[in-house]
Structures are given as structure tokens and as C-alpha cells.
Image (cartoon, rainbow, N blue to C red):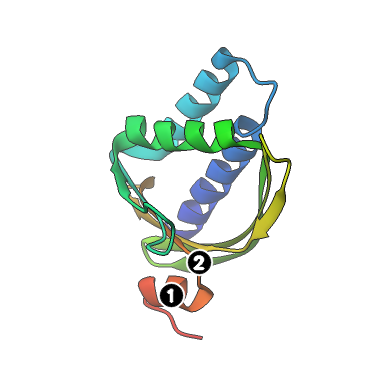
């Protein structure tokens, strides 16, 4: 089952990279988000890194979509390049290079967070963001 879990998470990133850009119509975003929703459980949970200002946990796909829409409003460009994937039982740990540009300022930034996806019955049940690699590994029960 774990290779299937990795493939589900990889598909989620492919969908994100299609959904993230400007120039997409509302219908395009609806279709892309519907594709992600097929990969997730109805009680999907998104947990932001505790270091982020205003970090929170979001319950359900509607709240997750609101989070994504906020990112896309604030950022004119945003891409996620998967650099490493680790398969850990019912979890998949992903290290990603995020690149973004602010809509208003044009400022560019890059970060490399770790993300821990928990899967249940072949669907993504939880996504946790960690700004520190070691914290992501520890959350998945691994140590470097």
C-alpha cells in the first residue's frame, strides 16, 4: 500500500502545480480542486507550521480551499518542486522547494519545508507543514 500512498501524494502536488497559477478561470480552479478532493478524505485536515504567524489547523476541504485561495491571492506565482519523498507506513514525508512572488510587492522568496501526509484507505487524511527538516522527520517517527 505504501507505494500507492506515495503516488497519491505525487498526484496531489501535480494538481497543486496546475491549480496554483494566475490566468486560471474559476472553472479551472473548481476542476483542479475537485481532482484534489478525490485524493482526500472528507475529514481532511491541514496543519500549518507552528512558527507561521497565525498558524492554525483547518478542518475539511472547504477550509483548505479557503487557505489555498488566500495563498493565490497574495502570491502571483507559486510553485512546488518535490525534492525528496520518504515512505513511512501510512505516512509520506515530502521535502519541497517552494518558490513564490508576492502579488503586490513582486518580492520573491523560497523555502524548503517538510510536509507529512497521513493517508487512510489510500486517501490523504492529514497534511502537516514543518519549517524544519528534523521536525518533519520526527513527526513521521524518523530521525536523521
Looking at the figure, which quarter contains the N terminus? bottom left
Q: Depth check: give the residue in front, 10 or 58.
A: 58
Point 46% across, 53% down: residue: 5
Q: For the residues marked 1 and 2, what is the alpha-carbon distance in whole angstroms?
A: 8 Å
Image location of residue 12, percent across then percent down: 53, 42
Residue found at the very far bottom of the displayed protein = 144
The answer to whether residue 82 of the structure is visible from this angle is no
Image location of residue 119, percent across then percent down: 36, 53
The answer to whether residue 61 of the structure is visible from this angle is yes
Point 45% across, 75% down: residue: 137
Residue 101 in which image quadrant: top right
Asked whether the residues under the numbered discs 1 and 2 touch, taking CB atoms below 8 Å apart as contact, a structural biologist would say: yes
Secondary structure state at the residue bearing disc 1: helix
As displayed, is residue 94 above or below residue 64? below
Q: Residues within 10 Å of mark 1 (few under 14, many from 20)?
A: some
Q: Depth check: give the residue in front, 51 or 65.
A: 51
Q: Residues within 10 Å of mark 2 (few under 14, many from 20)?
A: some
Image location of residue 58, percent across then percent down: 31, 43
As displayed, is residue 60 above or below residue 112? above
Q: Which mark is residue 92?
A: none
Mark 2 sits on what residue? 131
Amino acid at each position: 500500500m505504501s507505494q500507492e500512498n506515495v503516488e497519491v501524494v505525487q498526484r496531489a502536488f501535480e494538481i497543486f502545480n496546475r491549480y496554483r497559477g494566475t490566468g486560471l478561470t474559476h472553472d479551472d480552479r473548481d476542476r483542479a480542486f475537485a481532482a484534489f478532493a478525490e485524493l482526500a478524505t472528507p475529514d481532511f485536515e491541514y496543519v500549518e507550521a507552528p512558527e507561521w504567524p497565525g498558524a492554525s489547523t483547518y478542518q475539511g476541504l472547504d477550509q483548505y480551499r479557503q487557505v489555498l485561495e488566500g495563498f493565490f491571492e497574495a502570491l502571483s506565482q507559486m510553485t512546488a518542486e518535490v525534492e525528496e519523498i520518504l515512505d513511512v507506513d501510512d505516512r509520506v514525508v515530502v521535502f519541497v522547494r517552494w518558490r513564490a512572488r508576492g502579488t503586490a510587492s513582486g518580492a520573491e522568496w523560497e523555502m524548503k519545508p517538510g510536509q507529512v501526509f497521513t493517508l487512510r484507505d489510500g486517501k490523504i487524511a492529514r497534511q502537516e507543514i514543518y519549517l524544519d527538516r528534523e521536525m518533519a522527520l520526527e513527526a513521521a517517527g524518523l530521525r536523521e
